[in-house]
Amino acid sequence: MLAAIFIQGGIAALKSPQGHVQAAKPVLDAVKPLLEKATDAAAPTIDKAADAAPVDLPRTTVDWLDDETLVKIDGGVKVVAGTMLALGKFPRLASTALAASLIPTTLAGHRFWEESDPEAKQAQQVHFFKNVGLLGGLLIAAADTEGKPSLAWRGRKAAKLAAAAAATQAASVS
């Protein structure tokens, strides 16, 4: 059930990205310099991939990072990760991907602090805090080990077993 809203939102973003681009503009403008630095660092890898590809791929940062493409990538992440979560395939990874996607979506789409109309501000606050609640659910799902002990617990147990084995080995040597 948690995944349904993300799948639906991702499909909507893929079908008509322009409406999402307008809403996401403030966040995209803030994030783009970071993405440009990351892709500039990856330029040699991008060039190698473009050379090896059987089709003509864009090579410049601007080609890869236009607003519509970023919105479509976000929509694709929501559809794929939402579907994975709904099917129970890699639920921790899917929940983490959805949580990472939800944060910029919420900051872009529900900027209640910029609203001057009290009714619009109230509506945006409701959606903002709804998304915060969804984020909480995703974080719980991302941390869920399905009844298995966590990695931290397993690590502590392995360390204790290794220490006991080393102590036994040391006692037998001396």
Image (spheres, rainbow, N blue to C red):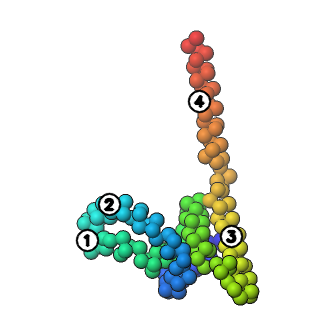
Residue 127 in the image: x percent, y percent? Answer: 69, 78
- Determine the secondary structure under disc 2: helix
Residue 126 or residue 25, whichever sits in front: 25
Q: Residue at position x 50%, y 82% from top?
A: 21
Q: Residue at position x 58%, y 74% from top?
A: 105
Per the model, the C-alpha gap separating discs 4 and 1 is 52 Å
Per the model, the C-alpha gap separating discs 1 and 3 is 43 Å
- Which badge, 3 or 4, comes first in the chain's sequence? 3
- Which badge, 2 or 1, comes first in the chain's sequence? 2
Residue 125 in the image: x percent, y percent? Answer: 71, 78
Q: Residue at position x 28%, y 64% from top?
A: 47
Query: Which numbered marker is on residue 132?
Result: 3
Residue type at mark 1? Answer: Pro
Residue type at mark 4? Answer: Ala
Residue type at mark 3? Answer: Val
- Which badge, 1 or 3, comes first in the chain's sequence? 1
Residue under pointer 2:
45
Residue 28 or residue 131, whichever sits in front: 28
Q: As drawn, is 97 to the left or to the right of 40? A: right
- Which badge, 4 or 1, comes first in the chain's sequence? 1
Residue under pointer 1:
54
Per the model, the C-alpha gap separating discs 2 and 1 is 16 Å
Does the image show residue 103?
yes
- Mark 3 or mark 4, whichever is nearer to me: 3
Does the image show residue 13?
no
- Determine the secondary structure under disc 3: helix
Residue under pointer 4:
162
